[in-house]
Image (cartoon, rainbow, N blue to C red):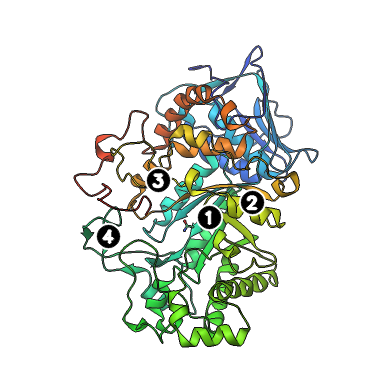
């Protein structure tokens, strides 16, 4: 056996560990894999993942076969995402989950116990790969919503990279991928009944390079979109990893790509919408949807296709950063406010959101939107993604609405991860690895009834300054490891968290990320190729702190 595996470097940290006890379990070519009904996703995942990493057959045992093996089973007395992992010396590795997801999270723990080689796609050395020390682990997540938002609009993320991110989420026991599919700078999902959304809206002619105040541009077109089959593949791949993909179609703001494709969606009485193109710079865009029945019908058509593709109980409708200037100036919008008996433009925004709240509810889905949807009155069934801090989430939870906490001050991973100007694009709040480790999703003082409405937490990655996968990796890692522990593990209050122990465990985790080929930020700062030359990423004189 080539190594005794450590039992104390797991991330996220499990609830309870026992052992190591005497003896161990050798994983080798004789090891069998048996899966009780309901655990097939994990069986498949273990064969493809550990089977590839260690070149093992992991054959299914035949009757009477008592070769040592990995056994997967369900125990309905455990919570659906809870699991128990027993390594029994020389006999078996038993993973018992409350539901299929619990078994899968147990398998993720098993992979970490097997050392960094378990994160490769082929073996790097010969011989029996590894032995596990006998032990017991009992574990369950703190939150049911443990998410990452990927903004695939500002920079398109090719499908294979999305699949890779699903693997990275699963490796950290995260279970929600929020896909920000539409924005001013690009529409990224095929909608068959409105082909110009991708025909026109998925491509922009050029792109602001780096910070929004940068004077530089990339003068090459940028684009891409997912076909229906691409989405089906992403959703199925996610489901196999017990990850829910929450689609976001942003309205009534962040809509310039859609308006460029279909000018009648915009406020054509105050702006020449036919002259609009897919936006080529960053910031909050004034071109918002017109409050007409035709626009509602258009977006219902969009959502019909979205619902066919995404089984997620929640559908995100955006609702953030919708400037009201065009509605204030537009005689048509003003007439609409009057006709609907609304007080002002804020209520017009609520009118949009309430419409889709009812429309989604009638189809058995739930609406979730950014915290601006509180302005002008929160729709009845709406859940809130609290991004401008905790306040929106607190107000929504106290009013009995479900909340996902993703405050930009803490978990916006596009923001710089070290002070100073050495980060590739040093924008936003400084949030170090330790800061993220000390992030607390439930604000102190929130009454228990309101706190029960905090479904969980989410880290958001906006990609204005991340034009490829390496740039995304750099911003996301290692901070996603700290975030995963916050979302999964029952950590004490922020000041009482054992950050030194987390750092110690991170030493093993960096080796896992190396094996996975993640281009993370090393503790010593950016590697030479992770820097940006010259002025490109530097904040310019007078630039606001956030893009
Ligand atoms: C957001 O960051 N505008 C949700």
Judging from the image, what secondary structure is the residue with disc 2 in? helix
Q: Find disc 1 in the rendering and name its residue.
A: 178
Name the quarter where the C terminus is drawn: bottom left
In the image, residue 231 lies at what x, y percent? 50, 62
Alpha-carbon neighbours of circle 3 within 10 Å: few (<14), some, or many (≥20)? many
Q: Earlier in the sequence, mark 3 or mark 4?
A: 4
The residue shown at (48%, 49%) is 408
Task: State left or right for residue 82 relative to residue 305.
Answer: right
Residue, far top:
22
The residue shown at (25%, 55%) is 214
Task: State left or right for residue 9 relative to residue 463.
Answer: right
Judging from the image, what secondary structure is the residue with disc 3 in? loop
Which callout, 3 or 1, points to the residue nearer the camera? 3
Q: Find disc 4 in the rendering and name its residue.
A: 208
Residue 394's disc is 2
Q: Earlier in the sequence, mark 4 or mark 2?
A: 4
**Does the closest atom of ligand 1 sit within 8 Å of the Cβ of label 1?**
no
87 w.r.t. 158: above or below: above
State the separation of the CA atoms marked 4 and 2: 36 Å
């Amino acid at each position: 056996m080539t190594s005794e595996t450590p039992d104390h470097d797991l991330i996220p940290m499990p609830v309870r560990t026992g052992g190591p006890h005497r003896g161990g379990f050798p994983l080798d070519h004789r090891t069998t894999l048996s899966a009780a009904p309901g655990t097939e996703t994990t069986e498949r995942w273990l064969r493809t993942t550990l089977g590839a990493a260690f070149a093992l057959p992991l054959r299914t045992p035949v009757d009477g076969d008592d070769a040592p093996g990995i056994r997967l089973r369900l125990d309905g007395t455990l919570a659906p995402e809870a699991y128990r992992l027993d390594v029994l010396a020389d006999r078996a590795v038993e993973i018992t989950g409350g539901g299929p997801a619990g078994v899968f999270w147990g398998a993720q723990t098993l992979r970490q116990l097997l050392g960094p080689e378990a994160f490769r796609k082929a073996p790097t050395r010969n011989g029996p790969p590894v032995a596990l020390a006998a032990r017991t682990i009992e574990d369950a997540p703190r939150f049911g919503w443990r998410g990452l938002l990927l903004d695939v609009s500002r920079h398109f993320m090719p499908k294979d990279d999305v699949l890779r991110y699903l693997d990275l989420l699963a490796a950290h026991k995260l279970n929600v991928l929020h896909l920000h599919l539409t924005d001013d700078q690009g529409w990224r999902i095929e909608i068959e009944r409105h082909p110009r959304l991708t025909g026109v809206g998925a491509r922009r002619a050029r792109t602001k390079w780096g910070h929004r105040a940068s004077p530089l541009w990339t003068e090459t077109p940028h684009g891409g979109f997912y076909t229906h089959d691409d989405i089906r593949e992403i959703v199925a791949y996610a489901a196999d990893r017990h990850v829910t993909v929450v689609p976001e179609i942003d309205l009534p703001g962040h809509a310039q790509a859609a308006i460029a494709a279909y000018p009648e969606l915009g406020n054509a009485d105050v702006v020449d919408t036919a002259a609009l193109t897919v936006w080529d710079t960053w910031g909050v865009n004034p071109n918002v949807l017109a409050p007409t029945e035709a626009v509602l019908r258009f977006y219902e058509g969009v959502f019909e296709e979205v619902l066919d593709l995404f089984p997620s109980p929640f559908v995100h409708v955006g609702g953030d950063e919708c400037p009201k200037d065009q509605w204030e100036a537009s005689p048509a919008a003003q007439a609409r406010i009057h006709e609907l008996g609304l007080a002002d433009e804020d209520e017009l925004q609520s009118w949009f959101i309430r419409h889709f709240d009812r429309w989604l509810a009638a189809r058995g889905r739930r609406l979730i939107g950014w915290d601006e949807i509180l302005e002008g009155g929160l729709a009845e069934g709406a859940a809130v993604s609290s991004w401008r801090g905790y306040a929106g989430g607190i107000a929504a939870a106290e009013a009995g609405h479900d909340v996902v906490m993703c405050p930009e001050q803490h978990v916006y991973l596009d923001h710089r991860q070290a002070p100073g100007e050495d980060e590739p694009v040093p924008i936003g709040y400084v949030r170090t690895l330790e800061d993220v480790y000390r992030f607390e999703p439930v604000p102190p003082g929130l009454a228990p009834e309101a706190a029960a409405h905090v479904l969980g937490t989410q880290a958001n990655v906006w990609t204005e300054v991340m034009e490829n996968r390496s740039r995304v990796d750099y911003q996301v890692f290692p901070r996603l490891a700290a975030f995963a522990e916050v979302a999964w593990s029952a950590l004490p209050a922020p000041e009482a968290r054992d950050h030194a122990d987390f750092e110690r465990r991170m030493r093993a985790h960096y080796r896992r990320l190396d094996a996975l080929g993640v281009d993370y930020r090393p503790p010593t700062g950016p590697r030479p190729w992770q820097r940006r030359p010259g002025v490109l990423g530097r904040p310019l004189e007078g630039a606001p702190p956030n893009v």
